[in-house]
Image (spheres, helix red, strand yellow):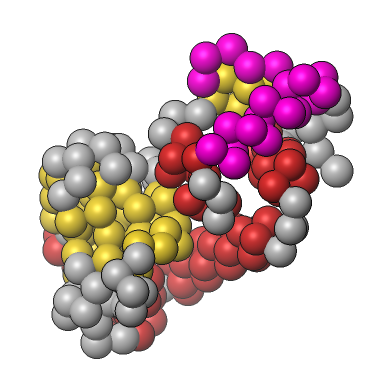
Amino acid sequence: MDLLTLESLPEGLRNGISYRNLAAKEMLFQQGDAASAFFVVETGRVKLVRYTSGDKMVTFQVAGVGESLGEVALFSDTYPCGAIAELPSRVIVYPKELLLSALRDNSDLAQDFIAMLVGKIQALKLRLELQNIRKAHERVLQYLRYQVGEQNAINFDRPLKDIAADLGLTPETLSRALASLEEEGIIMRSRLVITMQNSPAT
């Protein structure tokens, strides 16, 4: 039983699910909105953002197909962050109270939900590790190693400026780091595809 296999969900939750279509740059919810639902991206891509006191936008998560947003809604009255579609997207909407009830009554679903949260914590840990690498060249290299995993290449399906923001770098710094890695023979670039020339993971 899991949230992505809708036919396996408890009937009460399944019947309460709805869908929302988003245009690119359309808000799914805003920082401070009443927390009423949990979301899973069915198509497209949605990013979770927060605005600082200086009105600077900080990206906390970019959710692709099959990934979730708004877990905090289950335990909070308001959303501490906003969510905005990067691309035309469609999200599955799980009403807060119905999902909480289903989690209480279905141990398999609760275990799947916990596993999903653990995965997100691990992803956050990796982001923090990257932020603590001071040299841009090394930060970008480690990011690429995380992204390729057991594969040998990564396809950048997002603008470089967005990836740079995720890494806490300027687009210019990211471009210079990629150029340096290519000159050193560590990576090979072909349009949006980057191939690791050395061992991809450590």
* Residue 177 visible (yes or no): yes
Quadrant where the C terminus sits is top right
From what the image shows, is residue 169 above or below residue 159?
below
| Depth order, front residue of 189/183 | 183
Q: Is residue 25 left or right of residue 115?
A: left
Residue 155 percent location from the top left of the image: 54, 25
Residue 100 percent location from the top left of the image: 31, 78
Residue 183 percent location from the top left of the image: 77, 20
| Depth order, front residue of 167/56 | 56
Q: Is residue 10 left or right of residue 188?
A: left
Find the magenta span and give its range. Answer: 172-192
Q: Is residue 19 left or right of residue 62?
A: left
Quadrant where the N terminus sits is bottom left
From what the image shows, is residue 56 above or below residue 196?
below
Residue 86 percent location from the top left of the image: 29, 43
Q: Is residue 200 magenta?
A: no
* Residue 102 visible (yes or no): no
